[in-house]
Amino acid sequence: MTAETAMRVPGLKRAVQMHQDVVGTLPLVQYEAGGIRVAEQPGWLQSSASGVPPLVRTKGLVRDLALGGQTLLGCQLDGDRIIDAIHIPQMFWKITNAQIEVQDVIDPRFRQRLLYIPLGDNGILQDGIDTIRQARALDLARLVRLSSPPAGTELHLTDSRFDEMTRKQKQKMARDYAQTRTETSVSVTPSYVEVKEHGDKSVDLFADATNSIRLDLANHAAVPAAAIEGAKAGGGGDMSYSNTATERSELWDLGSRRYADAITARLSLDDVCPPGQYIAFDTTDAFTAPTPTTPPNRED
C-alpha cells in the first residue's frame, strides 16, 4: 500500500488534509528561553529561495509524518548556518544501514544537511493498513454495484414454453416494452407476461459500512469523527463540523499537535538553532476567538 493509493480513500485524505491545513498555516518562530522571540529571525523559517513556500513545505512534512511516521527536511547551508530548506518527499529517499540516501533528483544544495524527523510512533499506513484495505475493497464493491444495478422492471414469463427464448429474443421483448412505456403511459402485455416493478427498491451502496470505516479512519488519523463521517442512515444530510475555537483546539490538542511537536522538536536541536534557543509554531492567531480576519505575520 503506497501513500498515493491510500490517499485515494476520501475519509483518509480529508483527515490528513485537516492536519496539513492546521499545522501548515502556523508560522515557525525562533525563541530564547522564557518564550522571548529572537530579535533577528532566521529567514528560512518564513521564506524560501527555492520557490516552494514554507506553508507547502510544512504540509509535506505533516503528510509524511501522518502516513509514514517519518519525514525529511533538506537544508542549504552558508558555512554551518541554515539559509534555506525544503521538504524531501518520501519517494526520493530511504534509509540503508542507518544512513539516509537521497536520490540525485533533489538539488545538491538541499542535500548539504539532512534533518530526519521521526514521529515517535507508527504512521497510518502501518497501524491503519487493514482499515485502508477495507475502504478500498468497499469502494470496489460499490463500483461493481453501480455498474450493474438491479432492473427497475421485470417481465416475468409465466408460461414455460418461453423458457427456451434466445438472448436476442429476450432483449427485443424488453426493448419493445421499454419503447412502448416511453411513448404512452398505458401498456398492453400478453397473458403469459407478468410485469413486476422494482423501481421502489433502493440500491444498497453500503452507507452503514462506509460510515463504520470512516469512524475507524478518524481514530487512526486522530480527527473528530464528525469531520469525515458521511450522512447517518435516515438522517437526510451530511453531518456538520463547526469551526469554533473550541473544536479547533480539540483537533490541535488531540491530533495535529503531535505532528507539530515532532517537527519543532527536531528543529530545536543544536544543529539547527543555538543552544538555549528553540523553534516552535506560533499558535496565537490560530486559536484566538473570534478568528482574526488578518493573516499571521510571515514577513522574514
Image: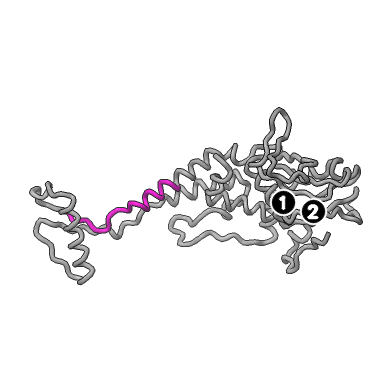
Is residue 34 in the magenta section? no
Between residue 84 and residue 203, name the one nearer to us: 84
Is residue 152 in the magenta section? yes
Amino acid type at circle 1 is Thr
Q: Which mark is residue 178?
A: none
* Disc 2 packing (10 Å; few <14; some 14–19; many ≥20): many
Q: Where is residue 208 in the image (x, y as percent from the top left)?
A: 45, 50
Q: Position of residue 265 (x, y in %)?
A: 79, 43
Q: Which mark is residue 28?
A: 2
Instruction: Look at 10% across and 60% down and name the residue there.
Output: 190
Q: In this view, does 147 lie to the left or right of 6?
A: left
Instruction: Look at 72% across and 47% down and name the residue there.
Output: 87
Q: Position of residue 152 (x, y in %)?
A: 27, 58
Separation of marks 1 and 2 at Cα, in angstroms: 10 Å
Which secondary structure, mark 2? Answer: strand
Residue 37's image quarter? bottom right
Instruction: Look at 58% across and 44% down and name the residue there.
Output: 3
The answer to whether marks 1 and 2 mark residues whose Cβ atoms lie closer than 8 Å is yes
Q: Which mark is residue 58?
A: 1
Amino acid type at circle 2 is Leu
Q: In this view, does 146 lie to the left or right of 39?
A: left
For the record, the magenta segment spans 139-155
Which secondary structure, mark 1? Answer: helix
